Amino acid sequence: MKIKRKPRASVYINVAPLVEVMLVLVIILMITAPTLNVGVQVNLPKTQAASLNNAEKDNIKPIIISINKQGQMYLDDMQVDIDTLIQRTRNAKTIYVRGDEGLPYGKIMEIMGILSSSGDCKVSLISEQQLLKTNAV
């Protein structure tokens, strides 16, 4: 007597929907990532200076201070006065200052001087990368 075997059902995972969902998520991430800002909205000056990556190499999380056009200082999203700023940055190794391009140079230098004299830290300015204009022949 012969036993009839049922043919095996082919089992596979259809990855096409997974790939489509992942592509949509990547596109959403690409659109929203440039809009994510650290702290307060500040119009940064544009320079041709090279990028600074020392803190990332040393695995040190820098403190970022934003100063708007009116001279108000922000640590992350919270507005702080100079005394609070000195207390919170006392043990910092790296401090980045995001100063608005309309802010007087003397005000930024005053704040940088206070921060650098309050502890043993590196204080640096953040700017936007300026696109180089090339002349087509």
Image (cartoon, rainbow, N blue to C red):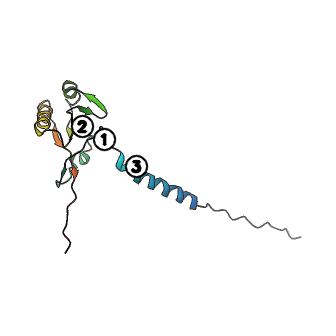
Q: Residue furthest right?
A: 1
Instruction: Please tell me the numbered disc located at residue 38.
Output: 1
Quote the CA–CA distance across marks 2 and 3. 21 Å
| Disc 1 packing (10 Å; few <14; some 14–19; many ≥20) | some
Give the residue drawn at x 22%, y 58%: 131
Quote the CA–CA distance across marks 3 and 1. 14 Å
- The answer to whether residue 62 is above or below residue 24 is above
Instruction: Identify residue for label 3.
Output: 32
Give x and y (percent) for residue 5.
Answer: 80, 67
Instruction: Please tell me the numbered disc located at residue 6.
Output: none
- The answer to whether residue 51 is above or below residue 109 is below
* Amino acid carrying mark 3 in the image: Thr
Give the residue drawn at x 16%, y 36%: 121
Instruction: Identify residue for label 2.
Output: 66
Give whichever of discs 3 and 1 has the lower sequence position: 3
Left or right placement of residue 15 versus residue 120 in this view: right
Residue 36 falls in which quadrant of the image? top left
Residue 3 falls in which quadrant of the image? bottom right
| Disc 2 packing (10 Å; few <14; some 14–19; many ≥20) | many
**For the C terminus, which image quadrant?**
bottom left
Can residue 102 be seen at all in this image of the molecule?
yes
Give x and y (percent) for residue 129.
Answer: 22, 53
Give the residue drawn at x 55%, y 57%: 18
| Disc 3 packing (10 Å; few <14; some 14–19; many ≥20) | few
Q: Nearer the viewer, residue 70 or 35?
A: 70
Helix, strand or loop under label 2:
strand
* Amino acid carrying mark 2 in the image: Ser
Give x and y (percent) for residue 39.
Answer: 30, 38
2 and 1 marks in contact (CB < 8 Å): yes
Q: Residue furthest bottom?
A: 137
Give the residue drawn at x 11%, y 37%: 109
* Amino acid carrying mark 1 in the image: Val
